[in-house]
Amino acid sequence: MQKKIVLVLAFLGLIGAAVAASPQDLLKGYESQSGKASSARGEQLFNAKHGKEWSCASCHEAPPNHDTKHIVTGKLIKPLSPNSNLDRFTDQAKVEKWFKRNCNDVLGRECAAQEKADVLSWLLTVK
């Protein structure tokens, strides 16, 4: 009986891995909602302040390829670039949660699909 349970759990784990998102999959999804991404627009959006006190770079720094700390809480933030942190942009629910929170902090509103596509497109170029 235990052997069957282990096999079922292993099988389910393989299925989960097969449907996991990749940064490229998420980018394609955002582009299908908005249009072709621009890494130049993404870099500009990431580094600029948009009428609020913070930019994305306030916490993630530029380039976002190393550990940083949140400017208010001091909490450790792992690298945002998917090239430096292979766990980034692999869980669509987490990605949406964090885009919602961070866009609200930086822009004062949720990001549009085009903005998400642009930022992710740029992040994929950051080594």
Image (cartoon, rainbow, N blue to C red):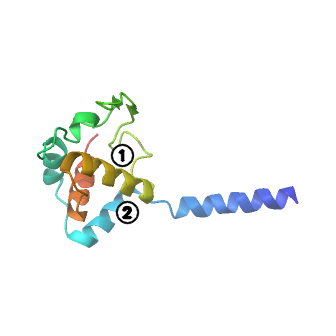
> How packed is label 2: few (under 14 Cα within 10 Å), some, or many (20 or more)?
some
20 to the left or right of 10: left
Point out residue 49 in the picture as x, y percentages from the top left corner. Answer: 13, 42
| Residue 61 appearing in the image | no
Task: Please identify the quarter of the rendering in which residue 22 is found.
Answer: bottom left
Point out residue 27 in the picture as x, y percentages from the top left corner. Answer: 31, 61
Residue 100, relative to residue 66: is it above or below?
Answer: below
Amino acid type at circle 1 is Pro
Q: Closer to the camera, 72 or 21?
A: 72
Secondary structure beneath disc 2? helix
Task: Please identify the quarter of the rendering in which residue 69 is found.
Answer: top left
Q: Closer to the camera, 33 or 127?
A: 33
22 to the left or right of 125: right
For this orientation, the residue located farthest to the bottom is 32
Residue that mark 1 sits on:
82
Mark drawn on residue 25? 2
Which residue shows up at 76% across the image and 60% down it?
7
Point out residue 61 in the picture as x, y percentages from the top left corner. Answer: 24, 34
Q: Closer to the camera, 50 or 29?
A: 50
Mark drawn on residue 112? none
The earlier-in-sequence mark between 1 and 2 is 2
105 to the left or right of 98: left
45 to the left or right of 86: left
Q: Closer to the camera, 17 or 111?
A: 111
Residues at discs 1 and 2 in contact (Cβ within 8 Å): no
Query: Quadrant where the N terminus lies?
Result: bottom right
> How packed is label 1: few (under 14 Cα within 10 Å), some, or many (20 or more)?
many
Which residue shows up at 16% across the image and 58% down it?
38
Point out residue 47 in the picture as x, y percentages from the top left corner. Answer: 16, 41
Amino acid type at circle 2 is Asp
Task: Please identify the quarter of the rendering in which residue 4 is found.
Answer: bottom right
Query: Quadrant where the C terminus lies?
Result: top left
